[in-house]
Image (cartoon, helix red, strand yellow):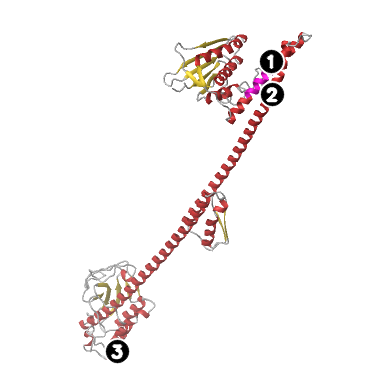
Amino acid sequence: MSNDIDVQDHGSIFNHDAVLRFARSGGTSTLMAPLTVSRDAASSRLLGRILATVSRLDEYPSLEAGLREIAVLIDGIPGVSGAAFELDHATGFEGNGFDDEVSETENPAGSDGATVASDWSIGGLRLIPGSGGAADGRNPVIPLRAGRTLYGWLRLHHESCPPPIRVLAELEAIGRLVALHLEKRQTIALLERANNDMAEAHLTLERDLYCLTVENTLLTAVARSQGRALRGMTAELALVPLLDTLKDLTRARHVEIADASGSFVFDRPALTLPDGPLGVAETAAKEILSAAAERAELCQAKRRAERAEFADLAKTEFLATMSHELRTPLNAILGFAELLKNQSFGPLGSARYVGYAADIHDSGQLLLQIISDIMDVAKVETGRINLAHDWVDASHLLVSVGRLIEPRAAAAGLSFEVVLPEQALPRLWADERLIKQALLNVLSNAVKFTPSGGTIRMTAMLAPLSEKLEIEIADTGLGIAKSELTKVFEPFHRGDGAMNRRFEGTGLGLPLARSFVELHGGSLTLDSVQGKGTTVHVSLLPAPQ
């Protein structure tokens, strides 16, 4: 008869139907050949029950319960008592490693048959970790081995005499069947663990793919919103693609931005987005809002600057127009006042009339000078002043300016001096009238703000490297406060204070002087110490060769 169970050294899986057929056949398999020797009917029935129990191990609620029943049945074999299965801790299928090097003679208990301290018992089932010493004749140990893997031992105890050899052979066959079942359970556990690991890996992959999809979708929406912002759209319109995408991804009823920080407010979202992509979207929204606020502020500043420029231009145009309109009748007043003062058509009848006419003429001359200065400021600011360039002798220019200012300095009780170098000064390619006017304005301020007994000195020299004409006008006057140094070049600014009217003037002298010099490519700066005097530096370019 052919074998019903084929068990090889590599450990075939225990076959349920084959064991049943083996049990019904009375045990004629080559594996169980020892059981066919001198068996009575009772022993055959007991063996069949043991084999049937082994075949039904999967039907028990636990492996311990099945092994306990098998141990009880083995105790019913004549000459056998104290049967117990001792399993290695790895057979609980909590680990992957098994000891392949343990021989069939290894025993988990000591030489006296006692178990280690960490064992525990469940009825006839004893489960312990590790392995022990060798077996003896009264306490035989049968290995539970399938192929090269040792799963534990079947421990027997007999007090009167050792069990027969044929019984041990039968029990060894039963132990191999139990080991085959344990091998099957191990394989199933490993497969279940592999399936669980694959399922977990699949879930992790799906989660990562979802996060990647969400991130790519949000990055696309962020790029669209940033593109709209760069094209000049308002923040509300620029953020529409991003808000719509967030609404679709979270299935919210509505999405809006809470404040300038870029935080989103979701109305009843069905899904929650990962923190990473959501943080990227919030950062992008914050940058778009910040850029829109800066752009709005720049637009407002530009509009304010344009309005101020328009107002300044309108003021300049008004001053230029009104100055021209005032100049025409003022010239007539000056002409008639001069006729009356000179009594060109005969005596006026009283000396007082002559004095009044002289006062009218002097006041008109002052008003005409003020109007002329206002017109010059308006022309400079509107860029409509025309330079009448010509060759100018610098030495002659300085001497003529000194002659004009010297009488006024003498009348104010001041010492005035013009110092020129021995070497000839270069010729200038400039508008002589404007350069002379600039120097006269500076010298007039020096005369005005220098007390009687002071000195005014105008010095000219040629710069050694740049060959520029350097003119220095120094006085020992009142000086200018440090806080006023940058304001004295503003039109209509009075360096002595708006409430102080000790000195006449409009505050246009220095601004015009600086503008006239800069029109020629030069520069005008000043140094001053309050109470000690002021020094003005004028630098003019030489004529081109």
Residue type (three-letter) at the residue carrying disc 1: Asp
Residue 358 in view of the camera: yes
- Say which mark, if any, is on residue 328: 2
- Of marks 3 and 2, the one in the foreground: 2
Q: Is residue 164 above or below residue 306?
A: below
Q: From the viewer's perspective, is 186 left or right of 161?
A: right
Q: Quadrant of the C terminus?
A: top left
The answer to which image quadrant residue 153 occupies is bottom left
Q: Nearer the viewer, residue 212 or 62?
A: 212
- Say which mark, if any, is on residue 362: 1
Q: Is residue 321 above or below residue 200?
A: above
CA distance separating discs 3 and 2? 144 Å
Q: Do residues under tags 3 and 1 come within 8 Å of each other at their CB atoms?
A: no
- Say which mark, if any, is on residue 144: none
The percent position of residue 506, horizontal first and vertical second, equals 64, 22
Task: Give the mark, 1 or 2, whose residue is nearer the N terminus.
Answer: 2
- Of marks 3 and 1, the one in the foreground: 1
Residue type (three-letter) at the residue carrying disc 2: Thr
The answer to which image quadrant residue 485 occupies is top right
Query: Circle 3 sits in a helix, a strand or a loop, which is it?
Result: helix
Q: Which residue is mark 3?
A: 24
The percent position of residue 304, horizontal first and vertical second, equals 61, 39
* Outermost bottom residue: 41
Query: Circle 2 sits in a helix, a strand or a loop, which is it?
Result: helix
Task: Give the mark, 3 or 2, whose residue is nearer the N terminus.
Answer: 3
Q: Is residue 11 above or below residue 227?
A: below
Q: Which residues are magenta?
A: 362-373
